[in-house]
Amino acid sequence: MTTWSASVPPKTRDEQPGSTRDMRARVLLAPLSRVGLARFPPPRPLPARALFHCRTLCTAPPGASEPPKDARSAPRPEGAREDLSEAAQRARLLEAAMKLVPEKGWTVDALSSAAVGLGLSPAAHGILARGPVELVEHFVSGCDAALAKELQERHEELAELEIQNRLLLAMQSRLQMLEPHVDTWSQAGRDGRPARRPPRTPPSPHAALPARRPPPKAPALTSLRRRGRRWRCARCPPTCPARCSLRTRSPPPSSRRAAETRTPRWRRRWSTRT
Amino acid sequence: MAPALVDPHLKRVAIGAIYGAAELYMLTDKSPGFSDTFLFVEREVSSLHSVAGVARQLQAYSPANLLMTLLSQSRR
């Protein structure tokens, strides 16, 4: 029975078991079934293999990762290398993110777009618990390893030089590794750290006191009239808290007597005093 | 022969300081091919070299050495 099901063409909607056409076919082909030419296999469940590629659904750009037709019969060339362990995933994610750093910087953005490029979920950067800091660490440790390897290779050449030139050469080669990331390297130190909180200061003793009432605003100098004993503007009520006559510009002294009243006695000139 | 600094840790610290300064210099370097940075490194390394030479010469002036030279001269 299993050998047969492999060669059965996919059934159309009308041939589903239970439909009228199916029943008709059963009746018509009943004599043949005794012969064994036509038998209707029971409906098969969806094979589990069809769900195999669901891992790569939705996130991969179209055509970016071609799902293998049959993983067993035609293994991908890198299939042997593909390792689903977490360390390998992290390494691959970091490598992919390093290529995106020049355009996106040392950010979570670079990590998530690298994850999308690998066919993972954009939230897959969560496997790097500390985010971009791990990217920076990966870069620095990779540079150090490359420098150590290079110095090891050029050992004979370096042994002839003075220590001063040896040091110079090593520093130059290390700085040259940094060159492709010069534009974004200044962020690298900053992004890793948690946002700096402003230092906590003890509350000011003035904060405990009740807020002082702001001084009342003097109304606009519209027209000053003499109301009662003071000069007031037209809008002021008779008991004006703003005391406009004190705060606003006083009217020009019209007469000598007015000048006398404004100037205190001890300041008056002799001429006016007499 | 290369002049030896007193302490190997001091060597590391000095080299690390120079490297860190060079990295910072590089971030603001606009010259083509980062030539200014490399000149900076060269300058700093040569000054470190001279400082290390001075440090080695200073050992000759340590009190113990001075005492030894005085004693040897007095014996003569």
Image (spheres, rainbow, N blue to C red):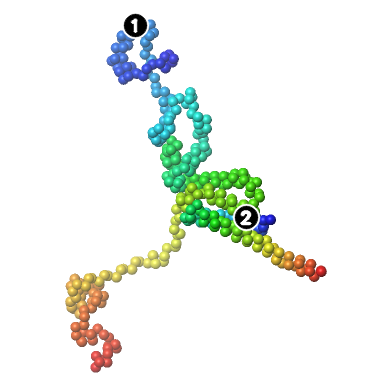
**Dots 1, 2 in contact, CB < 8 A:** no
Q: Residue at x 64, y 60 (%)?
A: B52
Q: Residue at x 49, y 41 (%)?
A: A95
Q: CA distance from mark 1 to mark 2?
A: 99 Å
Q: Which mark is residue A164?
A: 2
The one nearer the camera, A26 or A109, is A109
**Residue A6 percent location from the top left of the image:** 42, 17
Residue A108 locus on image (x, y percent): 44, 45
Query: Where residue A177 sits in the image (x, y, percent)?
Result: 53, 48
The image quarter in which residue B58 lies: bottom right
Mark 1 vs mark 2: which is more N-terminal?
1
Residue A27 placed where, x, y %? 31, 9
- Secondary structure of the residue carrying tag 2 is helix
As helix, strand or loop, the secondary structure at mark 1 comes to helix
Q: Where on the picture, by quarter, is residue A273?
A: bottom left
Q: Is residue A201 visible?
A: yes
Q: Chain of mark 1?
A: A
**In this rendering, would A242 be left or right of A82?**
left
Query: Mark 2 falls within which chain?
Result: A
The one nearer the camera, B40 or A251, is B40
* Front residue of A248 and B43: B43
Residue A47 or residue B75, whichever sits in front = B75
Mark on residue B33?
none
A76 in relation to A130, above or below = above
Identity, as a three-letter code, of the amino acid under mark 1: Pro
* Residue at the extreme right: B76
Image: A259 above or below A215: below
Q: Nearer the viewer, mark 1 or mark 2?
A: 2
Which residue, given by chain and number where applicable, does mark 1 sit on?
Answer: A31
Q: In the rendered picture of this protein, how many numbered marks are placed on residues?
A: 2
Report the residue at 50% width, 29% height from top. Answer: A77
